[in-house]
Every structure is written in C-alpha cells, then in structure tokens.
C-alpha cells in the first residue's frame, strides 16, 4: 500500500526515492516501507485492506464479524487458509507497524481487536488440536533443558529434507524463493518474542533479554540480525524493505509468523513463547551452517552468507540460554506453565516442518513454493547491476549504526 | 565492552552434553598468543572437539551424541 499518513519515521527517507534507486542503494535500509499493494485473498482480508486504505476516521467495518464467524464455522484448515492467515498478518501488523496505511488509528479499534481475538482463538484451537506434546519432565531447569534438547534432537533416520536440499542442490531461483519466504519473519527477527519480555520475571526475563540483546546487535545497528538478513537479501538482488513480498508468501509462511505473534502478544501464552524460542534456537545452528554452504556453492559471497554464518555461532549460545535459563527458569518460577512451554516448543517444530516441507515438496515437483509467479529475472539482473552497490549498502548500514 | 563489564565476574556454565557457556569478558587467545575476536558478550566454547568454528561451539555436539 502507498503510505499516505505522515510520520517522522517515514519522512526519514522518501520511499519512492529509495525504490527508484533499486534495492542496492545505500539508502535502502530495511526499515523503509514497501510500496506494494497487498492483495486481498478472500472476504476478511478484503474488508481489512479496504478499511485500512481509506483516509477516513476509524469506523465500524460492516460485515467483518460475520465473515470472521463464517470462516471459523466453515471447518476449513485455518493454518493453510490464505484469507485467514493474511487477515491475521494484517491485524498483527497494526502492532508492528509498516504493514498497512493508516494503521495507527486502527491499532486499538474494537472491530479489529474483536476480529483478531476470534481468528486467533480459532487458530490456536486448531494448533492445540494438531500439536502432540511429549511427556513432561520435572519443573527443574536442567530437566526442562534436557527434555527440550531431546525433543529437538536431529532425527538420524529422517529422510533428507529442505536443509539437505539447500546444502546440496539449491538452484539460484530457489535461493531467491527461500529468502522471500524467510523475509516475512526474519526482517522482523526477534520482534515477536520481544512482546513477552515484560510478561516474564527473574531468571527467565534476564535470559530472554540476554538473547534478544544479541539478536538486536548488542547496540550495533549493523549487527542486528534483521539488518544482516536485509543485507543478504540485497546481496542476491532482492528488495529488503519489509512487506515487499507479502503477496508472494503462501498461508503457511504467514501462519508460522502469526503463530509467534499470537504467542508473544498474549500474556497467558508466555509459557508457549518461551518454549517456542527455545525450540527455534535449538534447531538453528546446524541448519544455518548448511544454508551457508548451499549459498556459497551458488557463488554468493560473505555479504550474503554472513547472516547464516552468524547464526551458527549465535544460536549455539542462544539455545543453551533459552533451554536452561529461559524455559527452565520459567518452569521453576511458574511450574503450572510446564505443559505450555512444551506446547510452544512442539508447535514451533510442527509448523516450521510444514513450512520446510512446503518448500521442499514444491521444488521436488519442479514448482515454485511462492503463491504467485515471481519476477526472478528482474532480481537476478538487479544483483548483477548492483554488485558495486552491495558494498555501499553495507556502508549505509554501518553509517546508520553510527548515527 | 565498557569498563563496567570488565569488572563483572566471569561465569562459566558447563552445559550438560554441550559447550562451556561463558558470561563476562575473558581474554581469549590462540595458542600463539594472538587474541581471538569475541563478537558477543556471552560465548559458547566447544568441548566436544567437532565444532567447525573452534574455539566456539557450532551445535554439532548434538550430531555426535557427545556426553559430558
């Protein structure tokens, strides 16, 4: 959507100028707003997009509650429902910002909150129906940590999946798709878990902040993981502004991000968000090493692979803190949350497996994993034209860090 | 790191079946005395021997069923 409201953040750099200069421009830091129109995928997302695009004061959104109720009653698979997942993405986007026009005035509007609550309750109910939670350990930090490591351990008998494919046989177009899919969460890396910081106390809170400080670059903007990912995107010729590729992201990709927002934004789900982060970190180091190998094999340099390389080392630290101090610490202080911690961890493994399977199975079938045809040639051309700009983009990020 | 951090006590956690988790600033050096850059406040040091980024942990202890 085209920004229409004025805000100091968006006046910082005019989005059209940044866009015209191509993604490699030093001005295209990842905080700039996309200028793509988000396409509706059904009646709920259509009503929301229409309301958010009007410059009128917030109003009742006629028919929204009925459409939400109809979707929930339909018995459809909400995890893979394009309309429901885009609607949740838009509604959570009101809290993150930079997703829709005129979002500020809708953030606490009764209609958007009511729609979100209904949709997320149904989404959560379906997740709880599908997730199998393992036998619970004692609510002691070390026992919780060991049970989480067991739950997330690599299965030596598993058939080769997405990670192996990326390491060994990734194509250039698939590399672009992988980054487009990942951009929905990773350009906001760490943000959905940060919602839960004030909901935690003591050891668990200190642990989460220790992890998040590292995610946010320990005070260095150019080391923020979201910025590293933005540099990787620009390095392969993609536009790194948040939301540029939302229209290409299928429901399952939006669902994996929406699920973290759901866990992070609801205090009652603080156990689930702690478990989610633990499982997320515990299944990251080894795959990221293989992603780096796959991208290097395609000829991408350190500017692109730095994001993956960083996660090999960072997440080997984070997984220890998340398992023992965050999840374990929370279980010790609030033993009643033990099953929620393991629900969150199991839900993370389940939905991320689905995201990975979707990509892998699409590619094995010779198809794209994206929702609609992607302009690969333009991106590949962008990369070659922008090979000089890559370094200026990095310089721009470094300059931003110094500001 | 600022001077406040340097005054903090160093804490080393021997993680079960995993690395040594080190909080606080340490003087990390290679055998030849060259300083090893520490890019984050808390580091995990390999103790299973198979990490590809030694002295740091890369999580691969999980693939060799390392016990400690």
Image (cartoon, coloured by chain):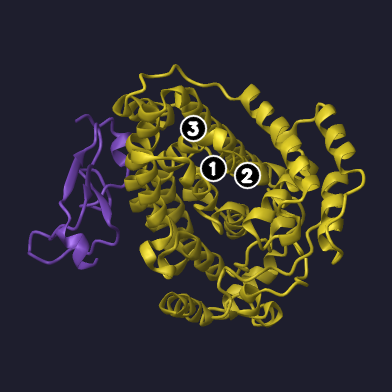
Mark 2, secondary structure of its residue: helix
Above or below for A108 versus A73: below
Of discs 3 and 1, which sits in the foreground? 3
Q: Earlier in the sequence, mark 2 or mark 3?
A: 3
Residue denoted by label 2: A359
Of discs 2 and 3, which sits in the foreground? 3
Indicate the position of residue A10 as horizontal and vertical percent values.
Answer: 65, 74
Compute the Cα span from label 2 to label 1: 7 Å
Above or below for A234 versus A73: below
Q: Which labelled disc corresponds to residue A271?
A: 3
Answer yes or no: is residue B48 visible: no
Quadrant position of residue A383: bottom right
Rendered hue of chain A is yellow
Rendered hue of chain B is purple
Give the quarter of the figure containing the N terminus of chain B.
bottom left
Q: Nearer the viewer, residue A345 or B48?
A: A345
């Amino acid at each position: 959507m085209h920004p229409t409201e004025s805000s100091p953040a968006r006046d910082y750099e005019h989005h059209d100028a940044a866009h015209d200069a191509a993604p490699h421009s030093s001005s295209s830091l990842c905080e700039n707003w996309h200028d793509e129109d988000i396409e509706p995928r059904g009646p709920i997302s259509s009503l929301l997009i229409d309301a958010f695009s009007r410059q009128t004061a917030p109003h009742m959104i006629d028919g929204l509650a009925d459409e939400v109720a109809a979707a929930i009653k339909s018995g459809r698979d909400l995890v893979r429902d394009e309309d429901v997942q885009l609607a949740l993405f838009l509604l959570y986007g009101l809290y993150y910002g930079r997703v829709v026009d005129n979002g500020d005035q809708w953030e606490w509007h009764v209609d958007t909150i009511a729609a979100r609550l209904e949709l997320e309750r149904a989404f959560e109910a379906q997740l709880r129906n599908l997730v199998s939670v393992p036998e619970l350990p004692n609510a002691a930090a070390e026992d919780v940590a060991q049970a989480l490591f067991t739950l997330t351990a690599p299965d030596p008998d598993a058939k080769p999946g997405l990670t192996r494919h990326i390491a060994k046989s990734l194509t250039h177009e698939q590399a672009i798709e992988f980054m487009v899919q990942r951009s929905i969460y990773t350009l906001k890396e760490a943000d959905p878990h940060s919602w839960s910081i004030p909901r935690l106390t003591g050891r668990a809170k200190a642990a989460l902040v220790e992890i998040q400080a590292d995610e946010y670059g320990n005070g260095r903007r150019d080391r923020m993981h979201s910025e590293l990912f933005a540099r990787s995107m620009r390095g392969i010729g993609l536009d790194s502004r948040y939301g540029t590729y939302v229209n290409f992201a299928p429901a399952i990709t939006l669902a994996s991000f929406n699920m973290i927002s759901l866990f992070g934004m609801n205090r009652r789900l603080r156990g689930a968000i702690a478990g989610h982060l633990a499982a997320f970190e515990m299944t990251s180091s080894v795959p990221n090493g293989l992603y780096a190998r796959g991208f290097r094999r395609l000829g991408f340099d350190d500017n692109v692979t730095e994001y993956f390389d960083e996660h090999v080392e960072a997440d080997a630290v984070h997984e220890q803190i998340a398992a023992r101090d965050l999840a374990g610490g929370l279980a010790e202080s609030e033993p009643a949350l033990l099953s929620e911690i393991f629900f969150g961890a199991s839900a993370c493994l389940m939905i991320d497996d689905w995201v990975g399977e979707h990509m892998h199975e699409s590619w094995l079938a010779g198809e794209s994993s994206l929702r609609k045809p992607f302009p690969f040639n333009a991106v590949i051309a962008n990369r070659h034209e922008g090979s000089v700009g890559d370094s200026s983009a990095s310089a721009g990020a470094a300059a931003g860090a110094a500001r | 790191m600022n001077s406040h951090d340097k005054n903090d006590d160093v804490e080393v956690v021997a993680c079960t079946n995993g690395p040594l988790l080190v909080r606080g600033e340490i003087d990390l050096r290679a055998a030849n005395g060259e300083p090893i850059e520490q890019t984050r406040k808390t580091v995990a040091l390999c103790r299973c021997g198979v990490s590809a980024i030694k002295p740091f942990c890369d999580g691969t202890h999980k693939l060799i069923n390392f016990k400690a």
